[in-house]
Amino acid sequence: MQLFRISNIVQRIAEAIESVINVDVTIIDNKLNRIAATGLYTENIGARINDKSVFAYALKSGESFIIENPRIHKACSRCEKKESCREFAQVCCPIKVNGTIIGVIGLIAFDEKQKASILSNKHNLLEFLSRMADLLATKLIEKKKSEEIKLLIGELEVLFDSIDRGLMLVDAEGNVLHYNSKAIEILGKEHIDNINKITRHFDIKNIVSKKLNIRNKEFYHSINGNNFRIVYSVKPIEVNGKIVRLVITLNKINEIINVVNDVTGASMEMNFDDIIGESISIKMVKDYAKKAARSSSTVLIQGESGTGKELFARAIHFYSDRRKYPFIPINCAAIPENLLESELFGYEEGAFTGAKKGGKTGKFELANKGTIFLDEIGDMPLHLQTKLLRVLQENMIERVGGKRFIPIDVRIIAATNKNLEKRVEEGEFRDDLYYRLNVIPLYIPPLRERIDDIPILAYKFLNKFNYKLGKNISHISEEVLQFFKNYDWPGNVRELENIIEYAVNMASSNCISINDLPNRIKNKHVKNMAADDIIISIQDLEKREISKAIRKFGRTKKGIEEAAKVLGISRATIYRKLKKYSI
Ligand SMILES: Nc1ncnc2c1ncn2[C@@H]1O[C@H](COP(=O)(O)OP(=O)(O)OP(=O)(O)O)[C@@H](O)[C@H]1O
């Protein structure tokens, strides 16, 4: 700590001491710089004092002392000016902060009268100087503390302003004391002159009296006639058991929605190249879907389960102008009927028993400016179909228990594996909604109608699961591929993917064979074997028959011998084949 930082105060204290004692005063710092002086040495303020002087001695000793006989006193022993010294007496009193010497107060008598004044009351004089030294030390500590506080305030101001949320500091009466630039951005510049009015949304009285912590509530706010929903939280600051301040954080709902979508991966990117298939039919659907992506009309995707309807919906979204906004999928059949409405449209706080505090944002709002994918639309209950139709007609949604309409800009892609026209005929699906949804119809053919795609898809999934499971299987046997082409694929591409995952787990050689497939598939294969038109390679046949025999007779030496006998091959041959096919 350096005395020069409070040099004004040091000088004032030096003058005060002089006016009380009538003796010249010099105050030096721990570097022997004269910080303050009165009388003869005033003009030497700022100059350095010799390091063999009495002051240097005082700094080193750390004790208070009085020199009654200059030149003879031991403090003068090293002084180079001792012979020419004009001083009659001197007093030194160190200034200490937490035990560290930071300077010295010195009194210098230049005549007998001043000397007498010093010597007449030695004890009280030293006591007085030590008080003055303490006063200087306290002033220096205060200065340091106030500089630290200034720095802290500066740091907090920068921090306050760099936070990407609106912040307001409010007193217990609701007066806004501070706000950051993000708060101005959220609330709108024109509201800043009347910022105290904003606090009426927060019920400050209640928060203060009940010491409440409020999390993620909403209020509606209007800027230039446009309505926004702002989400706020309030944290009280308590001092001695009383709430004295409140910190209010503000966020625009849209910004929160974007964060949620980013974090949950709602917008997992997908494009048309990720849709595998070289068959003419799939190529045609892709071309058609690319055209659909350019418009913002509603698309209805129809196709059996697992044909890739969601894949197409995602690819359309990421090929469209909405690609920077969320893609929000919702499966209308997977959510219980009583929850579906609030999932889709959200609800206000207190809308029903068990409703979450602060309400809930629905998928339509989450998808704002993006695309909502309504999967299994055929299973949507009739009363919600009516509500959905209104959304399509008016581009507005109403939260459950809400009193106002919220404008939305969402593209709808719906999908179903049901025959929707039939459901319309049966009265299970509103015909007006069907026509509204079916503006751009897209039909995805089942796998059995594009068998040329099966090997490509099978190898694509083989690579995927090799990577995922750390395997290195390079082939799928001809017998398996042939069987796949004849299989009916009720679960389409999803089923094919699952079967390959199973087989990659089970295969012990570098080729997937019939034996590696799940039992329910193998059984179907056995039945198919009866069909004359299926041709199986000799190798696959050999492998299958050897496996069958081993399963029947066992892997013991005796079992293998028995199997060789039944198969009509030698013992050496069966061992060789077992190794070859990794059975
Ligand atoms: N052409 C394809 N290329 C690559 N993977 C595909 C293809 N078609 C479907 N898949 C995969 O098959 C699985 C099922 O696809 P998706 O969920 O899109 O089908 P869906 O028709 O929406 O099914 P559901 O009717 O059950 O909702 C996914 O893992 C998907 O990645």
Image (cartoon, helix red, strand yellow):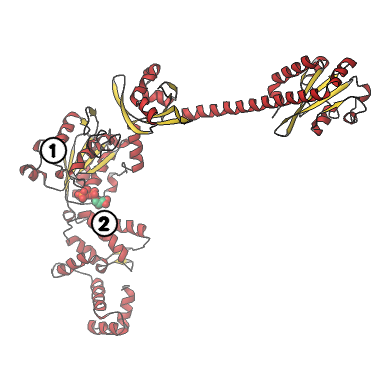
Q: Secondary structure at mark 1?
A: helix
The quarter holding residue 397 reads top left
* Quarter of the image with the C terminus in it: bottom left
* Residue in the foreground of this view, choosing between 36 and 128: 128
Task: Give how far across and how far down residue 129 sits, in percent.
Answer: 77, 24
**Residue topped by disc 2:** 497
Residue 228 position (above or below residue 579): above
Foreground label between 2 and 1 = 1
Q: Residue at x 82, y 17 (%)?
A: 23
The quarter holding residue 510 reads bottom left
Q: Residue at x 15, y 45 (%)?
A: 379
Task: Give how far across and how far down residue 157 sits, in percent.
Answer: 50, 27
**Residue topped by disc 1:** 383
Is residue 57 left or right of 277 when viewed as pictured? right
Residue 321 position (above or below residue 530): above
* Residue in the foreground of this view, choosing between 231 and 334: 231
Is residue 303 left or right of 41 when viewed as pictured? left
